[in-house]
Image (cartoon, rainbow, N blue to C red):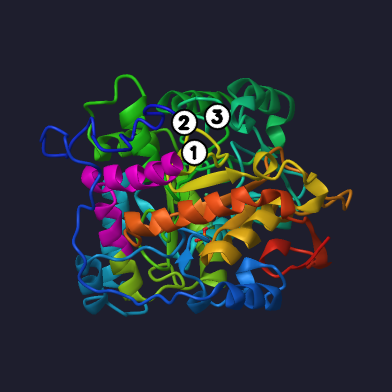
Amino acid sequence: MAGDRSGAGPGATSPGGTGDGEPGWWPEVEPFRIKAVERIRRTTRAERERLIEEAGLNLFGLRSEDVYIDLLTDSGTSAMSDNQWAGLMVGDEAYAGSRSFYALRDAVEETMGLPYVIPTHQGRAAENVLFTTLVREGHIVPNNMHFDTTRAHVEHRKAEALDLAGPWAYDPVSEVPFKGDIDLEALERVLCERGASVPLVLLTVTCNSGGGQPVSMANLRATSDICRRHGVPLFLDAARFAENAYFIKRREPGYGSRTIPDIVREMFAYADGCTMSGKKDCLTNIGGFIALRDPDLYQRATVWAVLFEGFPTYGGLAGRDMEAMARGLREVLDEDYLEYRTGQVAYLGRCLAEAGVPIIEPVGGHAVYLDALRFLPGLGREALPGQALAVELYIEGGVRGVEIGTVLAGRDPTTGLDRYPRLEMVRLAVPRRVYTRQHLEVVVEAARRVLARRDGIRGLAFAEEPPVLRHFTARFRRL
Ligand SMILES: *Cc1c(COP(=O)(O)O)cnc(C)c1O
């Protein structure tokens, strides 16, 4: 993995430097210092072998205190800033008309330009409320790639979740700068042939299931044009909108000198609304929202929000959580932060690649994805190589990643058969502002050691398989 693939300036020098115009001779150092710490415990290999067996070879079954470096998810695992913690104290817990709701609404309108905001307890709750309002049996929802809960919510409405990312998204080694782009011709075709059954089009920024890959502004603009011509609203699944904006700044011609807030405003200008998981780019531990442009849709959605979440000025959240989200939404636009953030993920990817570990390239915004089919070439897809690799990383170094492959994809609801995705991966998601470079070096060493003994690694099969979102609670056995 040579050179600067990410454009995020991984490594010892940073072409961008800091946001204040300093020439960039220093690495993407943390633009913060540490004010509070949380102890983590190292375990022995023998302990980990016992613990993962007890968990049914499913990393979701482990206790967090038995994990040394937890890269299961970047969702809700961010370290909040002193400013956000201070916000908790001034949160307004009123049932109706909370000051913290207005703080959130103002932050959303200021950053995204969307005036109608419904808070929800997290991103999937926003999906539930929006899809209950818009999606009916027989509908089709196109997306670059559906995130797992997004797909589940579309299917729960008895509609079809259609992934339309281009073929580039499924090539593990292509050096395409915007692998998250939707296939515009495929979208046009779907809207021409079945447009009457499409209640909305989604674009996931960054494309989580595709490796945290960004969507270009050109693709956002063109998608919006197509949707407008067919009279179909476009929504962003906006969980990592700021990371996406940073990639646009660094990789897309014409955006290098634009500010992040400016790029974010343009991204959302192409959309009719968004669902948001605050647990990602709001830098909070809980929260989410729907943001809309259309007052009528807002009125229709609030009916369901009251039923599923709560009164529209708290939506399943404490006032203090809305306050923390409002502050996080502004902090995440800081270019120094985004440079450090994407640079840290790129650093992990570069070190793994240098150690010979097969990864998906280019590295995305929030995670490094190991390519399990190349890592364990002896195991077929039916032997669940991603799950097997994730288990071995835990045994080796106390590192917890997560399978993004056949286990996660689940069964086709009509045929009942396993859906084999084109890629079998282990995602190492990096929590925001939490781990240091030394922690990441432990991850690299663990992966290197698993690679060295890969010929002895056996595949897995389901021992217990729940019918919905099976990856969370399934148990496995070794083949
Ligand atoms: C996390 C995520 C969701 C769901 O959000 P939760 O807060 O976990 O419910 C939806 N879409 C994408 C792209 C996500 O990353």
Instruction: In this rendered view, identify the residue nearer to me: 97 or 19.
Output: 19
State the image coordinates of residue 410 (x, y, percent, origin top left). Answer: 76, 54
Q: Which residue is mark 1?
A: 353
Q: Which residue is mark 3?
A: 227
Mark 1 CB lies closer than 8 A to ligand 1: no
Question: Residue 437 falls in which quadrant of the image?
Answer: bottom left
Label 2: element kind: loop
Looking at the image, which residue is at 55% across and 45% down?
369
Label 3: element kind: helix
State the image coordinates of residue 305 (x, y, percent, origin top left). Answer: 52, 65
Looking at the image, which residue is at 58% across and 39% down?
358
Question: Residue 388 falls in which quadrant of the image?
Answer: bottom right
**Was residue 20 drawn as part of the magenta stretch in this picture?**
no
Q: Is residue 417 visible?
A: yes
Question: Residue 5 falls in which quadrant of the image?
Answer: top left
Quadrant housing the C terminus? bottom right
Whether 405 is drawn above or below 257: the answer is below
Direction right: furthest residue = 415
Q: Which residue is mark 2?
A: 1
**Was residue 346 drawn as part of the magenta stretch in this picture?**
yes
Q: Earlier in the sequence, mark 1 or mark 3?
A: 3
Residue type at the position of mark 1: Ala
Q: Which segment did they paint magenta?
A: 325-351
Looking at the image, which residue is at 32% across and 80% down?
94
Whether 95 is drawn above or below 168: the answer is below
Whether 244 is drawn above or below 398: the answer is above
